[in-house]
Image (cartoon, rainbow, N blue to C red):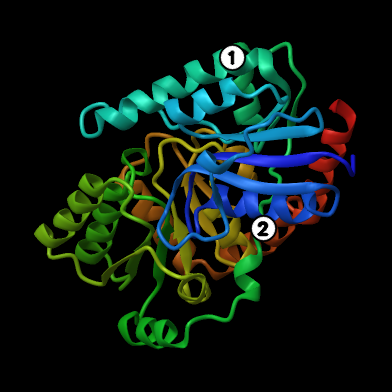
Amino acid sequence: MSSLEFHQILVGAGQTDAITNMARAIRNVLQQVGHSEIYATHIAPNVDDIESIADFPAAPRRDRVLLFHASLGDPETFMFLQSRSEPIVLLFHNLSPADYFESGDPHTAAMLTWGWRELELLRPRVVWAAADSQFNADCLREHGYDDLTIDVIPAGLEVGRYNAIKPDPHTMQMLDAYCDGPLLLFCGQALAHKRIEQLVQMQHVLAQYTQLNSTLVVVGPPTNRAIADAFLEQARALALPRFLALQQVSDAVLSAVYRRATVFVSASDHEGLCVPLLEAMACDVPVIAKRVGAIPETVQNAGLLVSADAGPIELAEAAIELSMNKLLRAELVVRGRERVKEFDVDFTLGKLVDGLAKVL
């Protein structure tokens, strides 16, 4: 395998998004067994460790393998893959449901729909596939990959990395001064299916009808500006007390927020894995989430799972329970520590390398 080139292909690369970070971890281990780079079609500003797909070597090589991270349709990336003769290994992260985007973001809805079509057209070129959850593997089999070996490998997932990052002291001071009760945290992109507006409504219920004195902190980039503007406007209209929206932050800031958090709350209606839930558990923050997508598989018995159709009131009740019930919190912290051990990055990267060795 040492003579091979392993190059990863991403639709988009960012500073801190989960897929790009997973690709970075994969690159580190593949560089130990061959030449490995990451190429992306769309690269965020200030990302200087990812190459443009336009700079990919033109001449094909028999000893080169392309590892394609599939999470969104993109005609330019697809045409690049179709133009190459190298074998493709598919790393599947699922695609968000297009119907959540049809009214407010029809372009993204179209790209998500097209993403499934891309996968169907790429099937003859794919020699092996890895999905980061059983839910994702099952989705892939339902779209023409039932005759292909699909292994469940969340490769490159460094769930405990925030424990090793020194927390930003200014953020710690700000949170200590601003939050005099439980801190309810959500980390994720501003996208329709994340249902951040339900978290705003949850905090409104807690502020108006309980004595919990909680603070809601929402961290994540405004990927869909309309969605971000909508939940911020909702918070203003409700005169929501004790609410912070931090948008894109550094790892040091996020490390500080995780350390101060009491509970991680997700209202998402769809997840193919949900990395922040695992990151929270790795930081001893118990989690609340809906029973949707891969979340039951990801969390198992290490979190408080509410119904798939839970609204703000049920989320608020769960937040009260986890904030006030010290015995339950302690139990879930212990279970969370055990659960995240199964996502050991060295183990999953080893499984990825073993899989590549078997099929290439």
Relative placement, left or right, of 153 versus 347 is left
Q: Is residue 162 visible?
A: yes
User: Residues under labels 1 and 2: Cα distance?
Assistant: 29 Å
Instruction: Tell me the quarter of the picture where residue 278 sits.
Output: bottom right
User: Residue 260's spot in the image, x, y percent?
Assistant: 48, 76
Q: Quadrant of the N terminus?
A: top right
What's the mark number on residue 177?
none
The residue closer to the viewer here, 140 or 57, is 57
Residue at the spot of label 2: 158
Q: Is residue 13 above or below residue 356?
A: below
Q: Quadrant of residue 205?
A: bottom left
Callout 2: 10 Å neighbours few (<14), some, many (20+)? many
The C terminus: image quadrant? top right
Residue at image point 77% right, 21% down = 149
> Residue 125 placed where, x, y %?
68, 17
Q: Nearer the viewer, residue 106 or 215?
A: 106
Q: Residue furthest front?
A: 59
Q: Earlier in the sequence, mark 1 or mark 2?
A: 1
> Label for residue 142?
1
Residue beneath the point at 64% across and 63% down: 282
Amino acid type for the residue under numbered disc 1: Glu
Circle 1 packing at 10 Å, graded few (<14), some (14-19), many (20+), is: few
Q: Where does residue 41 sit, x and y in percent of width and height?
A: 47, 40
Residue 294, compared with residue 209, is above or below; it is: above
Element type where label 2 sits in the image: loop
